[in-house]
Image (tube, helix red, strand yellow):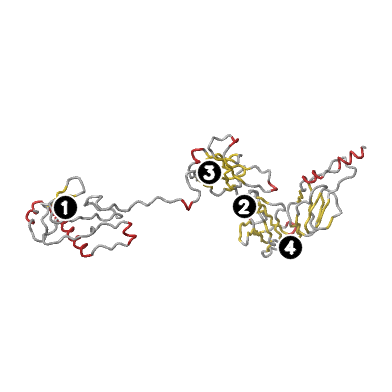
Amino acid sequence: MWALTAFLLLVPSSGQAATLEKPILSLHPPWTTVFKGERVTLKCDGYHPLLLELRPISTLWYLGHLLLPSHKKSIEVQTPGVYRCQTRGAPVSDPIHLSVSNDWLILQVPYAAVFEGEPLVLRCRGWYDKVVYKLHYYHDGQAVRYFHSSANYTVLQARASDSGRYQCSGTMRIPVESAPMFSAKVAVTVQELFQAPVLRVTGPREARGAALGGVVLRCDTRLHPQKRDTPLQFAFYKYSRAVRRFDWGAEYTVPEPEVDELESYWCEVATATRSVRKRSPWLQLPGPGFPPDPASTTAPAPRAAALAPGNKPLSFRKPPVSRSVPSVTSVPNTTSTGLQFPVDGAPTAGPPACAPPTPLEQSAGAPKPDVDLLLREMQLLKGLLSRVVLELKEPQALPELRGTPETPTSHFAVSPGTPETTFVES
């Protein structure tokens, strides 16, 4: 009976095995490239069964597809290749690729994945720790750092742009200073800590405690599986103004008065130390009064550039550039207020010479006014303006010019303090 109980305690169930995580394989010292003849230590940390087992549970080691004879938690190796480990009931660990070099100069990079915001350390090492002089580090063929002698190149907060192929060069005294030597190129990839966020509308607040009528916005992102325990903070913005600064909550409730407006929001996700910050695309909240289809939305008609003829009296002020010249209406042989033609001049029927055509006439292709009539009206207007200027400058000279056959007999009354002028027949 005791043997059966011990067997049940020692053998993990299928449900437990399914939830076990793969072990973590580490390398000491933490460099993937070493010189020939050097030894490194591999350590496997993962699930270990209870001590009540009838026989010890060993750790399995793999070099490529070859099963190694050792069953300890850590082993020392000097053979290049891909190493993995496994414990009972757990999947195989992630691999570590160990390289062995026989060069004078090697560039050592960390074995573990480097994530955004973490330091990236590169080490240019001479043969069996000989001092390297005139040391240069290169990133994708471009020199990024120079040291007089051996030193590590460190990127304090790595970014995705720091990924690429790195190389180093320098000289060594063996026994005299050698020519510049170059290491082999090593690829470095900076892993994404979390995805770029996306701002979504999750609907009304319901049981979230928000005010009635508000809308809940959620800032969604996803952490890397190896960094799922990293705490993140969220901030929300309306255009360029922060409506909620960094906090642990991933949701924000838009107040009810702002829901009815076409407002644009975006969110930002950052680590607690702000070493990594990413923002989402814009999200526009459609107001309830606007149609969902943008093509069905009609813009208001543009405002007319000029007034209709007759809506504004004649003015001697300089009109705006966008407005046309007001028209002058001619009425022959009348004693009412207006402009009198000479007796031998016949009135001309037709539309006003300076009246701008209406949009309907433009679309229908209405005929243009007669050019001769336009010239006559312009000459007549020029004469009238000349008499007004002369009357303003020398009022006593105006009676002497009355009755001349070249100019029609008219009198102009100028109202003081106003730009308009009224024509009165004498």
Q: Are marks 4 and 3 in contact (CB under 8 Å)?
A: no
Secondary structure of the residue carrying tag 4 is loop
Between 383 and 353, which is closer to the camera in this rendering?
A: 353
1 or 4: tag closer to the N-terminus: 4
Residue at numbered disc 1: 338
Label 3 sits on what residue type? Tyr
Q: Mark 3 to mark 1: distance in Å?
A: 65 Å
Picture coordinates of residue 61, whole percent (x, y): 82, 53
Residue at numbered disc 2: 159
Residue at numbered disc 3: 237
Q: Are marks 3 and 2 in contact (CB under 8 Å)?
A: no
Q: Is residue 305 left or right of residue 48?
A: left
Residue at numbered disc 4: 103
1 or 2: tag closer to the N-terminus: 2
Secondary structure of the residue carrying tag 2 is loop
Quarter of the N terminus within the rendering? top right
Q: Is residue 417 left or right of residue 183?
A: left
Foreground tag (4 vs 3):
3
4 or 2: tag closer to the N-terminus: 4
- Image quadrant assignment for residue 38: bottom right
Foreground tag (1 vs 2):
1
Picture coordinates of residue 323, whole percent (x, y): 29, 54
Picture coordinates of residue 263, whole percent (x, y): 49, 44
Q: Mark 1 to mark 2: distance in Å?
A: 82 Å
Secondary structure of the residue carrying tag 1 is loop
